[in-house]
Image (cartoon, rainbow, N blue to C red):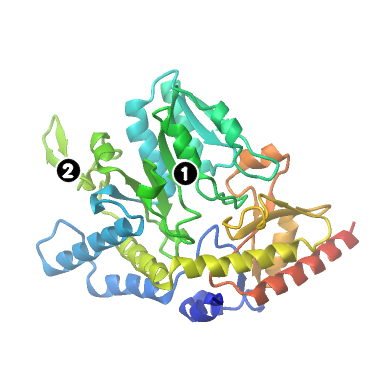
């Protein structure tokens, strides 16, 4: 079966990709791991809400509020079906995945973690999956441990196992690394962790837009995601957890909507999911996220994976032809299901110089530590350049990127 070129099918849906850069070059966006572009359907959904039924949810008896509530809760149902949750009550809307992890750390963590307990993370984690646990450790006296990597830039399962014990109350790790691109062996991690009665939190930000997710099959306890990485608006994300676990957790924030009754000396809490959603939510953004999810589902994740694998293979082949380059993380040959990105350094060239000069040619890539400073310190480097793709990317864009990269490297080395 031939692989469908999804870029040809979808490019017209993304208005920004038709723009020119500030330097009047054709715009090439290779920073999808930082934030994805938005299709017209999502943009139109935001405009439609504000133009035709802008109202607060759950609290009004009038028709605008009823329509807003229906669309808002419809987005929750779409999100629940997206990750194969048992119920929409298991989906908590948050500002982003960072807030979702903070919710777990503050609500579940402060209630269940004590001095002497341990939380096991990995060296490759995004700061959002390190800092909340550091704050919790300072409050409770628990200990953070970090599993290391293999020489191929993958999770070292033997080191992971050596650091797991009956003191480990939580394992929290990324599904696909935003820097290394490796896809972690979640089923193996879960199988090992369950022997110690350990809960598992999965950061799925880099996987949700690229492959189908089933929380029951993954058998994790918490899963977090961000809309802006799956073609949806910024300012909205979600936490999934099992209903019985969420029921046991106290509220994270206090205010309107999350209450059942309020007295001057005490309050009682609303039922799930509203117990964790204080105040007016990001209504338009939630609706937009629901539209983005349906857009991805209509494309089909098998088709997305096939096309992105073709692109990633070509990206690696192209980069490996650049003299002095070092790519971090497993190769596409070693890990065919890896993320569609490549982080790299080039001998004698600063990654920020690469990114800035590529920008003058209309090519948007990321440079720096990608919110993974511990990982870059582990490798003994200040940062990497990162090109990250999506199903809207093309072979021609990768070819142009490679040619301009070689030209810029030659130019910079000639200045030395």
241 sits left or right of 12 in the view: left
Query: Where is mark 2, residue-wise?
Result: 270
Q: Look at the image and tell me in which quarter the C terminus lies.
A: bottom right
Between marks 2 and 1 in the image, the one whose residue lies nearer the viewer: 1
Query: Where is mark 1, residue-wise?
Result: 187
Residue at image position (27%, 48%) is: 90
- Where residue 301 sits, quadrant-wise, is bottom left
Relative to 5, does residue 340 appear above or below in the rendering?
A: above
Residue at image position (42%, 38%) is: 200
- Where residue 1 sits, quadrant-wise, is bottom right
**Residue 374 picture location, percent across and down:** 62, 38
Q: Residue furthest front?
A: 1
35 sits left or right of 358 in the view: left
> Is residue 55 something one can see in this rendering?
no
41 or 51, which lies in front?
41
- Dot 2 or dot 1: first in sequence order is 1
Relative to 20, does residue 337 appear above or below in the rendering?
A: above
**Residue 274 picture location, percent across and down:** 22, 47
Which SS class for mark 2? loop
283 or 340, which lies in front?
340
Q: Which mark is residue 170?
A: none
Residue at image position (51%, 27%) is: 164
| Crowd rating for badge 2 (residues with CA inside 10 Å; few <14, some 14–19, many 20+) | some
**Residue 351 picture location, percent across and down:** 73, 54
């Amino acid at each position: 079966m031939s692989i469908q070129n999804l870029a040809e099918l979808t490019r017209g849906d993304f208005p920004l990709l038709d723009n020119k850069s500030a330097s009047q070059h054709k715009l090439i966006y290779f920073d999808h791991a930082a934030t994805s572009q938005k299709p017209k359907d999502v943009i139109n959904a935001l405009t439609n809400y504000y133009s035709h039924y802008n109202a607060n949810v759950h609290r009004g008896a009038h028709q605008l509020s009823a329509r807003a509530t229906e669309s808002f809760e419809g987005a929750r149902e779409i999100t629940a079906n997206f990750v194969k949750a048992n119920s929409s009550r298991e989906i908590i809307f948050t500002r982003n995945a960072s807030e979702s992890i903070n919710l777990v750390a503050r609500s579940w963590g402060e209630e269940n973690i004590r001095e002497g307990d341990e939380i096991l993370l990995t060296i490759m984690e995004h700061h959002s999956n390190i800092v909340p646990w550091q704050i919790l450790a300072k409050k409770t006296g628990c200990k953070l441990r970090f599993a290391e990597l293999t020489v191929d830039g993958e999770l070292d399962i033997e080191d992971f196992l050596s650091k797991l014990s009956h003191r480990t109350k939580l394992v929290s790790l990324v599904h696909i690394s935003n820097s290394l691109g490796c896809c972690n062996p979640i089923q193996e991690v879960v199988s090992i962790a369950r022997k110690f009665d350990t809960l598992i939190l999965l950061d799925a930000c880099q996987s949700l837009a690229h492959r189908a997710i089933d929380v029951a099959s993954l058998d994790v306890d918490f899963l977090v995601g961000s809309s802006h990485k799956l073609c949806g608006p910024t300012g909205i994300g979600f936490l999934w957890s099992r209903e019985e676990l969420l029921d046991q957790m106290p509220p994270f924030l206090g205010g309107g909507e999350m209450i059942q009754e309020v007295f001057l000396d005490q309050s009682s809490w609303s039922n799930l999911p509203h117990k964790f959603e204080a105040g007016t939510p990001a209504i338009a953004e939630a609706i937009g996220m629901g539209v983005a999810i349906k857009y991805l589902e209509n494309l089909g994740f098998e088709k997305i994976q096939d096309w992105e694998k073709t692109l990633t293979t070509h990206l690696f082949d192209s980069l490996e032809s650049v003299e002095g380059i070092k790519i971090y993380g497993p190769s596409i040959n070693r890990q065919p299901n890896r993320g569609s990105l490549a982080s790299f350094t080039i001998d004698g060239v600063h990654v920020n110089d690469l990114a800035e000069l590529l920008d003058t040619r209309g090519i948007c890539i990321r440079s720096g530590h990608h919110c993974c400073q511990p990982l870059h310190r582990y490798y003994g480097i200040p940062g990497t350049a990162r090109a990250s793709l999506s199903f809207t990317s093309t072979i021609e864009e990768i070819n142009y990127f490679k040619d301009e990269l070689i030209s810029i490297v030659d130019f910079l080395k000639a200045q030395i």
